[in-house]
Image (cartoon, helix red, strand yellow):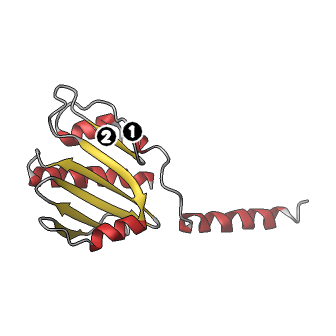
Amino acid sequence: MRTLRPVVVSTVLFLACLLPRFSFAAPSDACKVLTTDQVTAAMGAKMKAGEPPLLGKGCNWTQAANAFAPSLSLAITTSERFNMVKKANSPGQTITPLQGFGDDSFLVSSDVTTAIYVRKGNDAFNLSIPRSMDKNHATTVLKTLAGKALTSF
């Protein structure tokens, strides 16, 4: 048994070194990707706990005091959907590449919303804020929260 111990230890250490290279699946509960406190701090207003949408894999946070004030939505998606949006050339929509978020990322702005799309491996997510928030402020909020959300992917 003593002669097997070094072999077992070496094998475990070797596999542990490989572990970071494996791709892990996207989180199954989008409302656990960001905490309400993180969203509140970034948005600058008290937010209600995130709630899943009726359809899709996501989470929506609304302001506690005013349901019509700017809100935040997070959607978990695939790299295929990410690439489809990135290549889209919709009228009135501006796509700006971003650095430092996952394997690839970009910002989308239009008259309706500001959103950040992030891909990490085969998984992707997007965060969006309706245009009722100033675009520059929305961009800052989205970048802050995208950095925090990436820790779940």
Corner quadrant of residue 49: top left
> Tag 2: Cα neighbours inside 10 Å, few (<14), some, or many (≥20)?
some
Query: On the rendered image, what quadrant is the C terminus found in?
Result: bottom left
Q: Position of residue 83 (x, y in %)?
A: 35, 71
Q: Which residue corresponds to mark 2?
A: 60
> What is the three-letter code of the residue carrying label 2?
Asn
Q: Residue at x 25, y 43 (%)?
A: 72
Q: Nearer the viewer, residue 49 or 60?
A: 60
Corner quadrant of residue 139: bottom left
Callout 1: helix, strand or loop? loop
Q: Position of residue 131 (x, y in %)?
A: 12, 49
Q: Is residue 70 left or right of residue 4?
A: left
Q: How many marks?
A: 2
| Residue lying at the far top of the rendered structure | 65
For the residues bearing labels 1 and 2, Cβ distance under 8 angstroms: yes
Q: Nearer the viewer, residue 62 or 151?
A: 62
Which numbered disc covers residue 70? none
> What is the three-letter code of the residue carrying label 1?
Pro
Q: Earlier in the sequence, mark 1 or mark 2?
A: 1
Callout 2: helix, strand or loop? strand
Q: Nearer the viewer, residue 120 or 54?
A: 54
Q: Residue at x 63, y 63 (%)?
A: 16
Q: Which residue corresponds to mark 1?
A: 52
Q: Establish if 58 lies above or below 115.
A: above
Q: Residue at x 42, y 48 (%)?
A: 57
Query: From where the camera sits, is residue 104 visible?
Result: no
